[in-house]
Each structure stands twice: as structure tokens, then as C-alpha cells.
Image: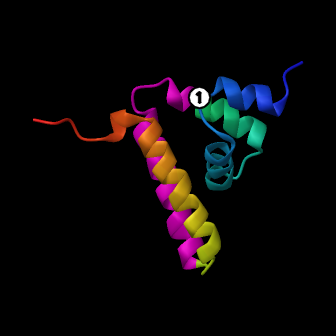
Amino acid sequence: MLTIEDCIALSDLNESEIEAISEHEHIPEIVAAEYGNYLMHSPEGVPMLKRIILDDIAAAERRNDLKHALHLRLVLRRFVRTHRDLRPAAN
């Protein structure tokens, strides 16, 4: 049987990124890991995941949860560094 840790490892995402998906989609983390795996392996998935994290940051700021917003900014920073295809192509 697979554990949540196994599912996260298979998704090419880390636990914080899975938590961001779970928060955004209002789904359990195990489902978020599966959804994240699907997105990571689809052409439009990485930009969609970036948007999910940005939406979570905005929601945290609207409810004045600045600590969580800062945490999510760090999640986004790591996500962008890890998935370089988010960066615009150099001319």
C-alpha cells in the first residue's frame, strides 16, 4: 500500500506544494498529490501550479494571514527555482 509520503514523492512536488494544492482546491492532501502529479506531467500544468500558489498567497493576504502568505511566497520561490520552465525564454 502507498503512503501519503510515497504519493508526494511520485508527484515531483514537495509537501508544501501539495498542501498549497489541497488548500486551493479544498481537497485532501492525498488527492492533491495525485492532482499535482497529473499537472506536473501535462504541458499546461507547471503554469497552473504557479497560479494556484499565487491564488493561495492572495487569499492569505485578504484574510490578513501574513505568516501563511510569507510561507506560501517561500513555497512559490522554491517552486519557480525547481521548475525552470516557468522562466521566460531568453532571446
**Residue at image point 53% right, 64% down:** 57
Residue 75: image x %, image y %? 55, 52
Q: Residue at x 49, y 44 (%)?
A: 79
Mark 1 = which residue?
Answer: 12
**Would residue 22 be found to the left or right of residue 53 on screen?**
right
Image coordinates of residue 18 in percent, x first then y, are: 66, 43
Residue 71 is left or right of residue 19, and the answer is: left
Quadrant in the picture for residue 85: top left
Check residue 66 for magenta coloring.
no
Looking at this view, name the residue that lies furthest to the left: 91
Q: Is residue 77 above or below residue 34?
A: below
Q: Which residues make up the magenta segment?
A: 38-62
Relative image position of residue 53 (x, y in whole percent): 52, 53
Q: Position of residue 77 (x, y in %)?
A: 46, 52
Residue at the image point whose x is 45% and y is 47% from the top: 50
The type of residue carrying mark 1 is: Asp
**Residue at horizontal 43%, vertical 35%?**
83
Q: Residue 36 lies in what quarter of the image? A: top right
- In magenta stretch: residue 43: yes
Q: Name the image colouring.
A: rainbow
Query: Which corner quadrant holds the C terminus?
Result: top left
Give 25 or 46, whichever is nearer the viewer. Answer: 46
Q: Is residue 19 above or below residue 45?
A: below
In the displayed structure, does residue 23 sit left or right of residue 2?
A: left
Residues 63 and 82: in front is: 82
Label 1: element kind: loop
